Image: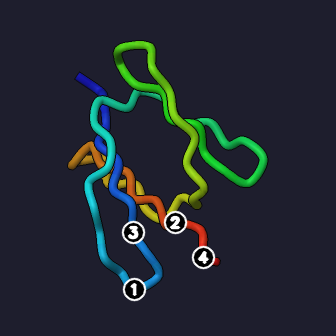
Amino acid sequence: MCEARVILQDAHGNEVEAFEDITTIVPEAGALKLFDLYGGHTTVAAELKEVRLLDHTVVLETSRS
């Protein structure tokens, strides 16, 4: 399977696994829209930090306030 898990990283480098089974990530007006295997979606205010292809993992850095 080609789904990815998404980890959110805060400004201090703390990582939290936030989403699983993500199939598509679309940039959208300063945010990222995440689509999952089951047809659901969510929008996250974050920037792409790292893609770990061998681990099927995407790391997003949450927007700093």
* C-alpha separation, residue under disc 3 versus residue under disc 2: 6 Å
On screen, residue 32 above or below 52? above
On screen, residue 21 above or below 52? above
Dot 3, crowdedness within 10 Å: few (<14), some or many (≥20)?
many
Measuring from the top left, give residue 52's x and y in whole percent. Answer: 32, 54
Q: Nearer the viewer, residue 2 or 42?
A: 42
- Residue wearing tag 2: 62
Farthest residue in the top direction?
39
Residue 64 is marked as 4
Dot 4, crowdedness within 10 Å: few (<14), some or many (≥20)?
few
2 and 4 marks in contact (CB < 8 Å)? yes
* C-alpha separation, residue under disc 2 versus residue under disc 4: 6 Å
Farthest residue in the right direction?
29
Measuring from the top left, give residue 15's x and y in whole percent. Answer: 29, 69
- Residue wearing tag 3: 9
- Residue wearing tag 1: 12
Q: Amino acid at mark 2?
A: Thr
Q: Amino acid at mark 3?
A: Gln
Q: Nearer the viewer, residue 38 or 58?
A: 38
* C-alpha separation, residue under disc 1 versus residue under disc 4: 10 Å
Q: Nearer the viewer, residue 63 or 49?
A: 63
- Secondary structure, mark 4, is loop
- State which tag comes first along the sequence, 3 or 2: 3
